[in-house]
Image (cartoon, rainbow, N blue to C red):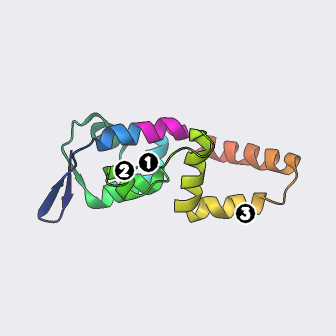
Amino acid sequence: MTVQRGDEDMTDSGSIGERMTQAMAERGISYGELSRVTGIPKSALQRYATGETAKVPTDRVESIAAGLGMTTARLLGWEETRPAVNGDEELTAYLDELKSRDEMRMLFSLARGCTREQVEQAVRIIEVLRKQE
């Protein structure tokens, strides 16, 4: 897949689509949810994932990476995936998301001093909000 930056094309030797679908699976994110977060049509995201679309505009690569809670460099394959924290891939994905998304860090910070019941109530509220979209 090629990343388009102005008049200059950069060829990605790996597969953005594979890294994208892997990150989506690890985080439990659907094409619809990623579309909502990034503003990129679901059909375009699916074409990027399958490699059907050969060129991806740089701004879209950046949006997809941010929506997946990863760096653009990692999505492009320029940055190695760091080893899992304590062998836990899911924990590593959460830490990466906290690192790259300020709003997730804010949510975690607010929840840190809460009781289990308060966190469970917040989760139910978020689930209702997600269903409304």
What is the x, y in percent for residue 33? 49, 43
Q: Which residue is denoted by mark 2 in the rendering?
A: 75
Q: Which residue is denoted by mark 1 in the rendering?
A: 81
- Judge whether residue 99 is colored magenta: no
Q: Is residue 71 above or below residue 19?
A: below
Q: Nearer the viewer, residue 42 or 19?
A: 19
Which comes sooner in the sequence, label 2 or label 3? Answer: 2
Q: Which image quarter is the N terminus in?
A: top left
Residue type at tag 1 = Thr
Disc 1, SS: loop
What is the x, y in percent for residue 96? 54, 54
Q: Is residue 36 left or right of residue 114?
A: left
What is the x, y in percent for residue 12? 22, 49
Residue type at tag 2 = Leu
Q: Is residue 91 left or right of residue 109?
A: left
Q: In this view, does 62 lie above or below 2?
A: below
Which comes sooner in the sequence, label 1 or label 3? Answer: 1
Q: Give the range drawn in magenta.
A: 22-31
Within 10 Å of disc 3 (Cα), the crowding (few <14, some 14-19, many 20+) is few
Disc 3, SS: helix
Q: Distance between the residues labelled 1 and 3?
A: 25 Å
Q: Which residue is denoted by mark 3 in the rendering?
A: 109
Q: Which of 20 and 84 is in front in this view?
A: 84
Q: Please indicate, yes or no, whether residue 39 appears anywhere in the rendered image.
A: no
Disc 2, SS: helix
